[in-house]
Image: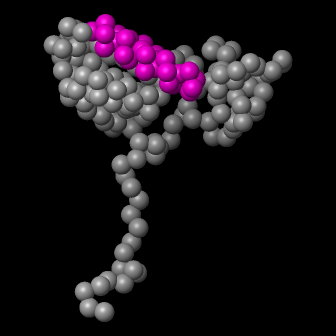
Amino acid sequence: MTGRKKSTDYSHQPRRDRMDEERVSDPYRARGKWPDSTVCPDCGAIVHHGHWTWGVAAPGAEQHLCPACQRIHDRVPAGQLTLSGKFFTEHREEILHLVRHAESKARAEHPLERIMDVKDEDDHTVVTFTDSHLVHGVGEALHHAYHGELKSQYTDEGDLLRVAWSR
């Protein structure tokens, strides 16, 4: 068999481009499953089948802050979106409405995906999030709706996804 390599010549290399792979150990990610009788005293999310969801807590439910409320309490975002540019300045309220709408849709299904803060700086606005997947999704939604330039990168520590959108 000339010209063909044996299958043993190939080695499997893991993909490095997946958003859902953890880059570092996240201290806000539970090491195990919360008991199904757990409720967050701040937001009211409950644990159902090992996942935080919206629902009604059982009487006498164990109370623990959910990871999103803990991040908000500690002021430690998982994602940061920086909005800038002349187009953003001229359409600020419309763009922030899209950001809040995308967060609202995500939060309705995933209680741990929330906006933490919206802060105006000199020439840009910074929105912080409790979840890196949400900031990524919001950045993609902005790019899809308004085009512009979208950049994403993790910090050197790997625990914060920074997304920048400008136009």
Q: Is residue 117 magenta?
A: yes
Q: Nearer the viewer, residue 108 or 36?
A: 108
**Quadrant in the picture for residue 30:** top right
Q: Is residue 108 magenta?
A: yes
- x, y (%) of residue 66? 62, 24
Question: Do we see residue 75 in this rendering?
Answer: no
Q: Nearer the viewer, residue 1 or 7?
A: 1
Most distant residue in the front direction: 145
- x, y (%) of residue 5? 32, 83
Question: Which corner quadrant holds the C terminus?
Answer: top left
- x, y (%) of residue 134? 44, 28
Most distant residue in the right direction: 59
- x, y (%) of residue 161? 37, 32
Q: State whether residue 114 is above or below residue 158.
A: above
Residue 105 placement, left or right of 154: right
| Residue extent of the magenta highlight | 92-121
Q: Residue at x 31, y 10 (%)?
A: 94
Question: Which corner quadrant holds the N terminus?
Answer: bottom left
Q: Nearer the viewer, residue 44 or 141?
A: 141
Magenta span: chief secondary structure: helix
Q: Residue at x 36, y 75 (%)?
A: 10
**Quadrant in the picture for residue 33:** top right
Q: Residue at x 31, y 7 (%)?
A: 93
